Image (spheres, grey):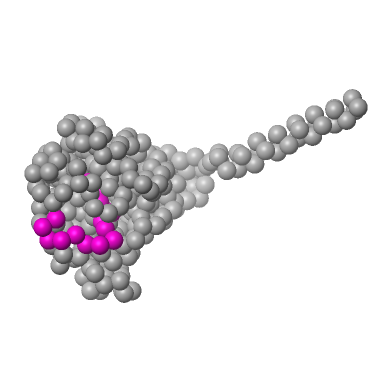
Amino acid sequence: MKKNVGMMVIIAAVVMVVGIGEASIYFVNPYSYGSDFDIGISGAEYTLEASESIEYNVIAFDNHGVSPVTELIICLDDSNYYVSIEKELELRGFTDIIFADVAEVLGEMNGDATGRAILFPFGLFPEEIYDGDSTDPLFADWMDAGGSIYWFGCSEIPDDAYLLPFGLSTDSFNTSAGRETVGRSGDICDQLRLRTHNVYHGLRSDIGTPIAYTSESGYSSITAMKVSQGTMVYVGGDMDDDYSSDCAQIIASGITYATTVLGYREGVLNGSINGEIPYVASAEENVTVYVHMGGYYTVYGERFQSATV
C-alpha cells in the first residue's frame, strides 16, 4: 500500500511539472522587444531591440497642435468585443483604459476632454449620450471640448437629422454590400499594416482622411475626421478580429484628424539596430513617433513624444 501511495505521489508530481511546462507555452512569451527614441524638431533617432527575427515599422507623425489620445474610455454594451480591443491595445503599450457603463461615461464627460477618447463598439450611441441633437452631452460636453470618439457605426444608417451635427447625411455612406476592388489609402495604412478593407457602410473617401483602404467607387473603410473641436474615427464594415487590431493600432499610434506623416522606416530586425528619421515638423511638441513589430500581426508597439511635451 505504501509503495502505491509513493508511486501516486511521483505521478502527481510529474503531471504537475508537465502541466506547468505546457502552461508556460501558452502564457509566457519567450521573446523580448524594446525601443528608445530621441525626438527633435528636425528628426528622430531610435534604437530597436528584438530577440528574434521580426518585421518592424517606425512612423513619425505631425499632429499640428491636436492632442493624440492618451486615455481611452470604452462604453460597455451587451457584447464582449471590447475584450479583444483591450488585448490588442496592451500589446501596443496602451494601458490607460477605463471601462464604463452609460452613467459612468456621462460622468467622465464632465472632466477634461483633451487627449481623451470614448469608444462605442456597436450601433447607435446610447440615447442618454446622444439622441440626435448638438446640445446632447456627446457634443456639448465632449466634442465641443476637443474630445475624441471611435465609432464602429451601425448595421443600418441613421437618418439625416441624426447625422447632421456630425456634418454627415445618409448620402455620405456606402450602402452597397457588393464586393469591390480596394487599395491602401496611403502611408498610414501601409506603415501601420492595417487590415480592414471592407468599405460597406464606410464613408465617402472625400470626407475627412481615409486611414485604411479606399474602394474604386470612392468609399473608405476607416475615416478620421474633425467633428466640432474633436476627432471622430469612423469604422465601416462588419466586425471581426481585423477591426479590433486596426482600432488598437490607430489609438496606440495617436492618429488625429490633423495627423500627417513626416517619415518612416521599415525592415527586419534581429538583435539591436540604431536609425534615424529626418523630417521637417511644424513644432517639436507636435511630433509623435510610433514603432510596432510583427507586421500585420503586431506583437509589440510603443508611442513616443518629445520630452518637451
Q: Say whether residue 241 is visible.
A: yes
Task: Report the span colored magenta.
Answer: 149-162
Residue 153 x/y as whole percent: 26, 56
Q: Quadrant of the N terminus?
A: top right
As displayed, is residue 138 above or below residue 260? above
Give the image quarter of residue 188: bottom left
Q: In the image as oriented, which residue stretches furthest toward the left?
A: 135
Residue at image location 45% in from the left, 46% down from the top: 299
Asked whether, in this view, residue 267 is left or right of residue 96, the answer is right
Residue 289 x/y as whole percent: 28, 44
Residue at image location 47% in from the left, 51% down from the top: 54
Choose between 184 and 12: the one closer to the eye.
Answer: 12
Choose between 76 and 219: the one closer to the eye.
Answer: 76
Q: Quadrant of the C terminus?
A: top left
Residue 50 x/y as whole percent: 47, 43
Residue at image location 30% in from the left, 37% down from the top: 100
Q: In the image as oriented, which residue stretches furthest toward the top?
A: 2
Answer whether residue 154 is magenta in the image.
yes
Answer whether residue 17 is magenta in the image.
no
Residue at image location 57% in from the left, 43% down from the top: 26
As displayed, is residue 250 above or below residue 306? below
Asked whether, in this view, residue 177 is left or right of residue 41, the answer is right
